[in-house]
Amino acid sequence: MKSDLTNQTNFWSKLEKPFIGLAPMDGVGDHPYRYIQKKYGQPDIIYTEFATVEGFCRGVTVPLRDFIFDKTQRPIIAQIYGKTPQFFRETATVVCQLGFDGIDINMGCPAKSVANGGAGAGLINTPKLAQEIIEATQAGVQDWVNGKTATDCEHITPEIAKEVEKRSLNLSEEYQQHQSIPVSVKTRIGFDSPIIDQWLPILLETKPAAIAIHGRTLRQGYSGKADWNEIGKAVRIAKDSSTLIIGNGDVSSKAEALEKVNQSGVDGVLIGRASFGNPWAFNDEDASINQKAAVALEHAQLYEKTFNEDEKYSFLPMRKHLSWYIKSFEKAKEVRKQLVLTNNSQEVKEIFDKYELL
Ligand SMILES: Cc1cc2nc3c(=O)[nH]c(=O)nc-3n(C[C@H](O)[C@H](O)[C@H](O)COP(=O)(O)O)c2cc1C
């Protein structure tokens, strides 16, 4: 299954170091969110929220929604998760056809619904399967290079294959070529306790282009502090490999990201939660409350435009973003109470107008 990874189109090698990226975030990092983050914060790389390979290969179309993007977000990496190597292989071909710049495998999600079934951070306990999954994903990329498309994949339904083809025909010609894209991994420092010195060499054997490490164990979930010493250890372990090491956890600004780079030697940093309602976390610009409200409204309008034709369209998932944007406003509590009841961007605008936020 091993493919030759030396000649791949590798955007990672073209990145200026240190780079700062937007972390993958399920339920947050959809197309409107990523678009706004890139426009106002300019992260160097962007990950999608994770999408299930099991779902893709059982005909579920919902994950395709997570994979909407536009060219402003490049380089953009599609993150996938699951536990069945063959499904990773076929989904990798689909990801290539959709025109992504990279594929990332989630080996860090601690959610019971994911990890207890053996996917996400559950893979830290099954290193052989983890390696098989990386190799299967690399093989799926090679299938694409060899001419395969979604239609040729055994478990990809005609409905999904048709949508993938439609989207691929809208890509620029360059992205319709059957070019190789790099495969990376995002993981944690261990399952119950930090075991990066055992876990990282296992991942490195499969030569991923990059490994992003959230400095917590699965057991920790989001409690305690990210352990950047363990991340620094990973940098030393990987130093003779061609794999980039990316650190992640509790970074709230560009300045802090650069501090972590100096301290740990990572090639780049991912910022997750600090970007909520705050794309300026990536460039440390000071945004006024009026700017924040204007961006919140633009976000809400793009959200509507992107999704309002979906069968199960709802404005609900947008409401949390609105609250995040206005966090620093002195009347935040009062405004939030109204924003969480909004059902469209016009109602958002009326509230912002009332408080002279626009
Ligand atoms: C709401 C939410 C959703 C997340 N979803 C994903 C995901 O889909 N894939 C993934 O690899 N990590 C996911 N994470 C983890 C983040 O990518 C990141 O590793 C973590 O939040 C630590 O970084 P931070 O302290 O900068 O937030 C998620 C985190 C949050 C808060």
Image (cartoon, rainbow, N blue to C red):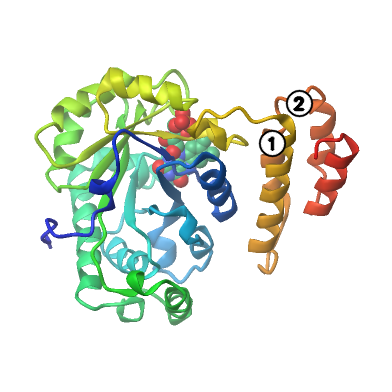
- Residue 86 falls in which quadrant of the image? bottom left
Q: Is residue 250 visible?
A: no
Mark nearer the N terminus (1 vs 2): 1
Q: Is residue 113 left or right of residue 82?
A: right
Query: Who is closer to the viewer here, 149 or 134?
Result: 149
Residue 348: horizontal and vertical position, in percent? 81, 46
Q: CA distance from mark 1 to mark 2?
A: 10 Å
| Type of the residue with mark 2 | Phe
Q: Position of residue 189 (x, y in %)?
A: 29, 29
The quarter of the rendered structure image containing the N terminus is bottom left
| Residue at horizontal 32 percent and vertical 55 percent from the top | 102
Left or right, 260 with reference to 294: left
Determine the secondary structure under disc 2: loop
Give the label on residue 329, or none.
2
Amino acid on which the number 1 mark rests in the picture: Lys
286 left or right, relative to 343: left
Q: Which residue is mark 1?
A: 292
Where is residue 158 shown, x and y percent of the image? 43, 82
- Estimate how packed mark 1 is, as few (under 14), some (14 to 19) or many (20 or more) residues with alpha carbons within 10 Å: many
Q: Name the disc covering residue 44, or none.
A: none
In-front residue for pair 8/236: 8
